[in-house]
Image: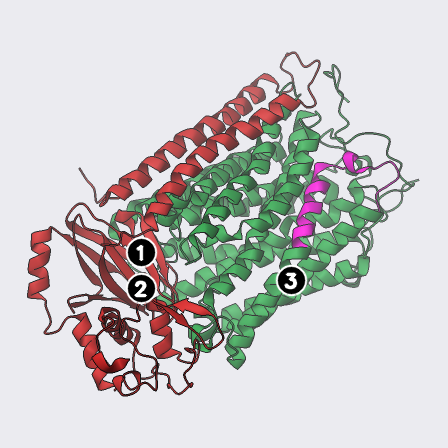
Amino acid sequence: MISPSYLHRQGLLSWFLTRDHKRIAVLYMITVTFFFFVGGLAASLIRIELVTPNGDLLTADGYNRAFTLHGVIMVWFFLIPSIPSVFGNFLVPIMIGARDMAFPRLNLFSWYLLLGGGLFTLLALLLGGVDTGWTFYTPLSTMFSNGHVVAVICGVFIAGFSSIFTGINIIVTVHTLRAPGMTWMRLPLFIWAMYATSIILVLATPVLAITLLLVAAEHLFNIGVFDPRLGGDPLLFQHLFWFYSHPAVYIMILPAMGVVSELITAAGHKRIFGYRFVAWSSVAIAVIGFLVWGHHMFVAGQSMYASLVFSLLSFLVSIPSAIKAYNWSATLYKSDLTLHAPFLFALTFIGLFIVGGVTGLFLALLAADLHAHDTYFVVAHFHYIMVGAAVAGYFGALHFWWPKITGRMYSQLWGKITAVLIFCGFNLTFFPQFLLGYLGMPRRYHSYDPDLQFLNVLSSAGASILALAYALPFFYLLGSLRWGERAPMNPWEAAGLEWRVPSPPPVHNFDAPVTVDFEAYDYSPEARRDPL
Amino acid sequence: MNERFLHLWPEQASDYAVSVDWLVIGFTAMMALFVVPVFVALWIFIWRYRRGKKADRDHRPQSNLPIELAWIILPFIGSLVIFLFSARLFFFARTPPADALEVQVTARQWMWKFQHQGGQREINTLHVPARRPVKLTMISEDVIHSLFFPSLRIKQDVLPGRYSMLWFQAEHSGTYQVYCAEYCGTDHAAMLARLVVLDPGDYEHWLQDNGSAADLISQGQDLYRQYGCGSCHESGSAPPLAGVFNRPVRLSDGSEVVADDAYLRDSILLPQKQLVAGYLPIMPTYSNLLDEEAVQRLVAYLRSLPATAFGDSK
């Protein structure tokens, strides 16, 4: 007998009051998609403005508000919740053989916090506007900015609790709800990545919350914490902010790395090369990631010796990332490779991540950073990681698990076209920015030197391709809900518990209790002569 | 050459800039060494092992410790070598020579103000001599700014309430673009300046043509008189100032500090912050009478005072 799928019950209330991790994942997916398009709209404004060297589309304040909105929305309401909240929620219980998350009510509450905080922030950004940049540097944000700084801070503060609760939920779920036989070394690497991410979410987000409260207190009550005129220290803000915000980058990229480990193995139908190294590298990134925040402050006025130490530690944190990249490519050796759309997204991830990671090392290199800091070189670098790689990871996950989530297949052709367009559009948008940055174009400039126009036009041209590529899945994936074929249980012939339940899964995931007696990536150690 | 259409490499106005460029080029080459094999391997494996293609897929490796260690250790050692080169350059860039020509910089939304030792003042343009080290002592009157010389490959944030330092030695005369690199509000993108590097002879002419009646020290002396600093500091009711610069000062909390630029500035604007031992906290703040530029002049005067300046001060 087959129990009804989790999508079976109808009615809005059945969604808004659900405690099913799979439904909450779908709610998150709709929410972050909305914020992705809002943030993308602001990005388009920025790139259109920069087609000409003079600031002629937006006013200076309008431009500053546009990039602040873009940063705030993309960082806190798309990138950070994207993979952990959508795919973490959907997959963590199924992948470890559990019926749900450890705290289903807290899980739903987390979604309301993100939605509420997000809408409140968006309203404040649109009605009053904030021109501090997403970094809220003091004393600009506390004493000199106009706009609704405190309201935006409140919105981010609220959404922060969504992160913390989701992190706690995932940690407790992985510790307590693994099915019998699902040992730590049998966990899919996506779970390792989500676990490491959750540690960061739980440890770093409270520091951001405290920092933002202090900014609000200084802004509202003139309590001197960061403003030197009140006896504060502006560098203290930067230390606290980057203590959160550097690990936050790993919140965005670690889950995507976990996704790529799943996509590569599923496409190659082969166990990952160096499972233990890939698994522990996620934990290493989470731990070392907490010790490198000072590389954002090489020119800020911190001590020269502190800068030397932070530079060295930043080289260290690149090692676990390199381990992953090398192991992914080694996994394809003697594989049995199907070139479906999710795999192309994984390749896009690897290509963009390597460029982003390597250029990050240029910025960790002290003498190079004195020049490249706060220029478009930095903008290009972190977009390669946070947008190029992380969004490719998110889209890869979307294309890989879409049949599981919705029970429908989508057009492989359109998926592949999108992956290729993203790769090309992204490089055309952001590679010229490395050159612009090294030429000295500072970031957050509303107008610029006319000598730099050609590279800016290239970048904007690429952005229009990228915008199209990011919008495409919205249409063909939604279309698949109506016209797509019904998805089989295991369309990719992949290993993993989620492929042993129907598509879409039943309400309680498994009809019978699960016992695990197989390793992760349980593919044949020898070549498979006949299909599954 | 059509430079306006497409120029891809920034000008090099100093030897340091040349060194940084070589560091970057060298590091790029090394990174290519570690990265290109990944891309090549990916393409080869995708081609050889795609489904349906006949290939040897038996005895698939699951892990290999020597290989793992090799691709962990080799890139790390390589990067460490470059790190050391970079650290040496960084140390050089952050350590000004003692004989550097000093220029005082004050930043505010949205302009750069420069004061030369000879009393010359400029806004958004900085004239310096070629082939001579120049040290900038910088402070902001409002938010954080950052003085960025792309052609010299250096920048440094300019903070409110704290002096920061930047030094360089430009080799080639010419005019170079200067930016504010730290986002500072509405007209951040318009907070531009020019660096004019002059050959030493031209620089002397420029100093003379733009010389004011008084140099920075005598301007500071005027302020010293105008605000009556001496009435307390020369009478014994406040600490004597003759020869105070760079000397250790014992504070009322028992600690000791060196009377550097920052200490002298803070003592004028925030007199209660570090009280000299043995004196009453009677000095009012001058923060509403003196702006940062005036403080720089006053500090220049205090720095110039020899220990015997006011014969009777003991």
Task: Please tell me the colour of chain B.
Answer: red
Q: Do discs 2 and 3 belong to a common subunit? A: no
Please, what is the three-letter code of the amino acid marked with disc 2?
Answer: Met
Residue B166: image tag: 1
Q: Where's the N terminus of chain A, which quadrant?
A: top right
Quote the CA–CA distance across marks 2 and 1: 8 Å
Please, what is the three-letter code of the amino acid marked with disc 1?
Answer: Leu
Q: Which residue is mark 3?
A: A206
Q: Residue at x 74, y 36 (%)?
A: A188
**Crowd band around label 3 with a 10 angstrom C-alpha radius: few (<14), some (14–19), many (20+):** some
User: Over which residues does the magenta segment extend?
Assistant: A177-201
**Crowd band around label 2 with a 10 angstrom C-alpha radius: few (<14), some (14–19), many (20+):** many
Q: Position of residue B112 (x, y in %)?
A: 26, 65
Q: Which residue is mark 2?
A: B138
Do the residues bearing badges 2 and 1 touch, measured as CB atoms within 8 Å? yes
| Towards the viewer: A460 or A101 | A101
Q: Label 2 is found on which chain of the structure?
A: B
Q: Position of residue A286 (x, y in %)?
A: 63, 46
Q: Is residue A502 above or below residue B196?
A: above
All told, the count of numbered labels is 3
**Crowd band around label 1 with a 10 angstrom C-alpha radius: few (<14), some (14–19), many (20+):** many
Residue B305, image quadrant = bottom left
Q: Label 3 is found on which chain of the structure?
A: A
Secondary structure of the residue carrying numbered label 3? helix
Q: Which chain is green?
A: A
Which mark is in front, 3 or 1? 1
Quote the CA–CA distance across marks 3 and 1: 36 Å
